[in-house]
């Protein structure tokens, strides 16, 4: 069934407005939802990500991961990418580390992906598919006894969020359906649950909160896994380390911002990742914080400027400068994207 019809009939038959995170879950991950069967990434599709901008992004991450493995693990391990998209980041990492054959020889590679069209694309695009036994899964196998290096780019931004505002009471945004105008709209509802109020009141001083309990739970499971079995968990995503003044939920279609509640299932819905929550979860689970910085700071610290100069000797310098600028400048992705690396090694 068409996703809009499904949500509409759910709201009408239950005679209740729908929680925002439930709506987002249907729109992105339900049958016929956006991530169910669309190919969203690339210049001909809805949005472009850092690995699609330049090979330099994956090369720096590849070198970092190799350095960690070689200096602190140096034995059989799980190499896990969450949400590999078109497989570009994975290929760039593998190209970089292929100079060090032990790394790939000792790696048990797992790509965690839910989108069937993207899995097919990854199987076509990934260069080492014939020489290495790569496994695909829709979730992490937390029973593995090996240490793991887990990494992701723009993975956590698509987790559903709930939005709260403090006026006289805490109010939560719900999705309602207006039959006359035949459209979805947001409505405020007073939060009554004592458990939820207790949690919201922990965020002292905040008047506006955008929380993803689902994302936090996912992140925490990985932190516990790393704590128990050892390894490193590397996340890059757009997000914030300081509290926000406005809600960040957004929809992107064809490289343009568009309305979250319209053409449901045909556009990417995402929100800026609340890195304050992620950092707190990692600290609560007693992981070491290796890096907690902007994408710009991470890439510069680990050598992207030197890599660009090196590539410039044999390639079009102007093109490389444009790519570098997109990745690290403050007006593009440099500051908006954050990097959090936590470990137990
Ligand atoms: C915004 S794309 C980023 C793709 C890629 N990392 C890149 O940087 O180009 C998000 C990716 O995560 C996948 N994804 C989203 N939620 C997921 C989940 N819960 N489990 C596994 N994969 C998921 C999507 O299908 C897609 O491949």
Image (cartoon, rainbow, N blue to C red):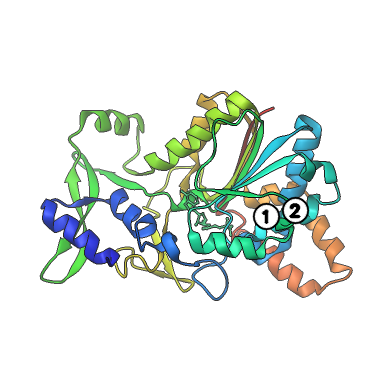
Residue 199 point in image, percent of width and height: 31, 30
Mark 1, residues whose alpha carbon is within 10 Å: few (<14), some, or many (≥20)? many
Residue 35 point in image, percent of width and height: 44, 60
- The residue depicted at 16 percent of the width and 70 percent of the height is 182
Point out which mark residue 90 bears.
Answer: 1
Q: Is residue 44 above or below residue 325?
A: below
Secondary structure type for disc 1: helix
Q: Is residue 331 visible?
A: no
Give the side of residue 6 with respect to residue 178, left or right. Answer: right
Give the side of residue 22 with respect to residue 255, left or right. Answer: left
Q: Quadrant of the C terminus?
A: top right
**Contact, mark 1 vs mark 2 (Cβ under 8 Å):** yes
Secondary structure type for disc 2: helix
- The residue depicted at 75 percent of the width and 31 percent of the height is 73
Residue 193 occupies quadrant:
top left
Toward the viewer: 5 or 57? 5
Residue picked out by circle 2: 94
Toward the viewer: 128 or 259? 128
Point out which mark residue 338 bears.
Answer: none
Q: Is residue 142 above or below residue 29?
A: above
Give the side of residue 78 with respect to residue 163, left or right. Answer: right
- The residue depicted at 59 percent of the width and 24 percent of the height is 228
Residue 306 occupies quadrant:
bottom right
């Amino acid at each position: 069934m068409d996703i809009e019809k499904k949500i509409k009939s759910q709201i009408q038959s239950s005679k209740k407005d729908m929680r925002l995170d439930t709506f987002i879950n249907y729109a992105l991950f339900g049958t016929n939802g956006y991530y169910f069967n669309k190919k969203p990434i690339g210049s001909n599709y809805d949005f472009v990500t850092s690995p699609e901008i330049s090979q330099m992004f994956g090369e720096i991450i590849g070198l970092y991961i190799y350095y960690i493995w070689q200096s602190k693990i140096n034995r059989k391990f799980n190499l896990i990418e969450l949400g590999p998209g078109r497989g570009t980041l994975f290929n760039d990492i593998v190209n970089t580390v292929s100079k060090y054959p032990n790394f790939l020889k000792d790696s048990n590679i797992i790509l965690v992906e839910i989108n069937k069209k993207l899995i097919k694309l990854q199987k076509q695009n990934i260069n080492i598919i014939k020489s290495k036994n790569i496994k695909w899964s829709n979730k992490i196998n937390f029973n593995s006894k090996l240490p793991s290096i887990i990494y992701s780019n723009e993975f956590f931004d698509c987790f559903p969020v709930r939005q709260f505002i403090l006026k006289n009471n805490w109010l939560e945004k719900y999705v309602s359906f207006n039959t006359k105008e035949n459209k979805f709209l947001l409505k405020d509802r007073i939060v009554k649950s004592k458990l939820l109020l207790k949690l919201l009141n922990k965020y002292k001083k905040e008047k506006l909160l955008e929380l993803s309990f689902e994302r936090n739970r996912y992140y925490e499971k990985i932190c516990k896994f790393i704590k128990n079995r050892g390894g490193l968990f590397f996340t890059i995503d757009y997000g914030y380390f300081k509290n926000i003044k406005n809600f960040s939920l957004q929809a992107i279609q064809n490289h343009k911002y568009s309305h979250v509640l319209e053409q449901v299932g045909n556009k990417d819905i995402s929100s800026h990742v609340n890195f304050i929550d992620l950092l707190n979860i990692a600290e609560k689970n007693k992981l070491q914080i290796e890096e907690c910085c902007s994408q710009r700071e991470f890439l510069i610290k680990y050598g992207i400027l030197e890599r660009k100069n090196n590539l410039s000797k044999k390639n079009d310098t102007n093109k490389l400068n444009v790519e570098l600028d997109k990745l690290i400048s403050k007006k593009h992705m440099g500051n908006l994207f954050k990097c959090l690396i936590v470990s137990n090694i």
